[in-house]
Image (spheres, helix red, strand yellow):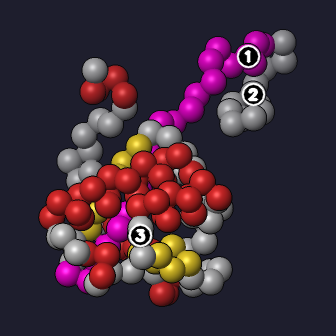
Amino acid sequence: MSDFRRNKWQPSGSNNSVPALQMAPRITMLAAVDSRGSIYLSLAQANSNKQVFGMFLRYLSLKLDRDRPGWRATSLILLDGAAYHVADSTKQLIKKLRLPVSVLGPYSYQSQPAELFFSAFKSSDINPHHIATTKGNFD
């Protein structure tokens, strides 16, 4: 259950039903950070899973192939070992795309540049003008 409005104090005999499930839109951010200061982002209205991560890797490799030919010889992609990072389908994709990858040990956030980016991003006000961000505003 994700809506706890039914658990409230109210007069005896009053209706306590909830007309519709209220769910906030979820935004997932995947990020790659390089040593030159470039940040490659993907935003999706979905949970991170192996399909979303696979799509991120495909588009990241296409972008790098176009912008920095030969990047595979001088780059290393660090992954933190999330379930979708080490899934069999992800391993097959990494091999197919010839991606230089290293999976870090569990809970090694200090070694992960993307985690430092996430920390800085989350500590800032990303919507200083308080612009409405619901789906209805983008139709």
Residue annotated with mark 3 = 99
Q: Secondary structure at mark 1?
A: loop
Residues marked 1 and 2 touching at CB (< 8 Å): yes
Asked whether 137 or 33 is in front, the reply is: 33
Q: Is residue 119 visible from the viewing direction of this image?
A: no
Magenta residues, dominant SS class = loop
Tag nearer the camera, 3 or 2: 3
Asked if the stretch drawn in magenta spans residue 88, the answer is no
Which disc number belongs to residue 6?
Answer: 2
Relative placement, left or right, of 128 versus 2 is left
Q: Which residues are magenta?
A: 14-36
Asked whether 82 or 100 is in front, the reply is: 100
Which disc number belongs to residue 17?
Answer: 1
Asked whether 79 or 125 is in front, the reply is: 79
Residue 23 lies, with reference to residue 11, above or below; the image says below
Residues marked 3 and 2 touching at CB (< 8 Å): no
Q: Decide which of tag 1 and tag 2 comes sooner along the chain.
A: 2
* Residue type pointed to by label 3: Leu
* Residue type pointed to by label 2: Arg
Q: Looking at the picture, how far across and down is residue 129, in whole percent? A: 20, 47
Q: Residue furthest right?
A: 12
